Image: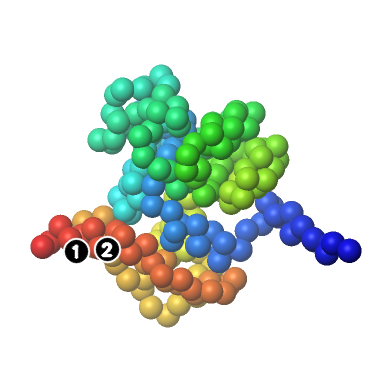
Amino acid sequence: MLPIWNAPPPMNHDEYSDTYIRGILNTVKTIAMVGISPKDNRPSYFAFKYLQERGYRMIPVNPGQAGKEILGQKVYAKLADIPEPIDMVDIFRASQFAPAVVDEALALKPRPSVIWMQLGVRSNAAAELAEAAGIKVVMNRCPKIEYGRLSSEIGWIGVNSRTLSSKRAPLLGKGVQRMSLNRTTMSGGATDAATRAQQKDQDSDR
């Protein structure tokens, strides 16, 4: 008699543990942002710039801006045009377009390890497609906000980050106030910081 395989319970996309979010932000290196705006007053532009300054390799995707540059990075029309592997796809488009973006991501070789849908973007259909392929999913969250919360950056402006520490978060690098994700939160758990940002600065000093 064949053993019965019990599928894991479906992911609860109404609430994510800090460990889950932190693990993603500490692991991914290259992020393709689909739907970035070239306008410097748009949320997508802010998020792109913020993550870029914290050491992530950011790739803009916007068919209307293809061939141009945003924040010094070449813009691609679609995911398939990007000539390098992508760790995470950050969807900055309306929810109804998310399944099509996931379809594009699934056609990539190698596939990204994370699909992240921005604040206000939620598609159960897109999540099911990605998860069926073994890809992690985050919906209705902003990586900029989550990074700031887990590093305690947002605590500087009086926002409760739910991060417990008696010490100021360590800075990583020079210039922009990069901070470590080595913070113990109310959800528990602490992992290595986004050390690539720190290493980048150390390499530039050599």
Residue 154, visible in the rendered structure: no
- 135, 19: nearer the viewer: 135
Q: Position of residue 88 (x, y in %)?
A: 47, 46
Q: Amino acid at mark 2?
A: Gln
- 163, 84: nearer the viewer: 84
Name the residue carrying label 2. 198
Q: Position of residue 58 (x, y in %)?
A: 36, 42
Q: Is residue 154 above or below residue 87?
A: below
Q: Which residue, as the protein is rendered here, is positioned at the far right?
A: 1
Which quadrant would residue 36 be assigned to in this image? top left
The N terminus, quarter of image: bottom right
* Left or right, residue 204 beside residue 63: left
Q: Residues within 10 Å of mark 2 (few under 14, many from 20)?
A: some
Secondary structure under tag 2 reads helix
* Dots 2, 1 in contact, CB < 8 A: yes
Q: Which residue, as the protein is rendered here, is positioned at the far top?
A: 64
Q: What's the mark number on residue 202? A: 1
Q: Position of residue 125 (x, y in %)?
A: 70, 37
Q: Residue at x 42, y 39 (%)?
A: 32
Q: Position of residue 177 (x, y in %)?
A: 29, 59
Q: Which residue, as the protein is rendered here, is positioned at the far bottom?
A: 166
Q: Residue at x 57, y 62 (%)?
A: 20
Which quadrant would residue 179 be assigned to in this image? bottom left
Which quadrant would residue 129 be assigned to in this image? top right
Q: What's the mark number on residue 173? A: none
Q: How many marks?
A: 2
Give the distance between the C-alpha atoms of the residues marked 2 and 1, in whole angstroms: 6 Å
Q: Amino acid at mark 1?
A: Gln
Q: Residue at x 40, y 43 (%)?
A: 85
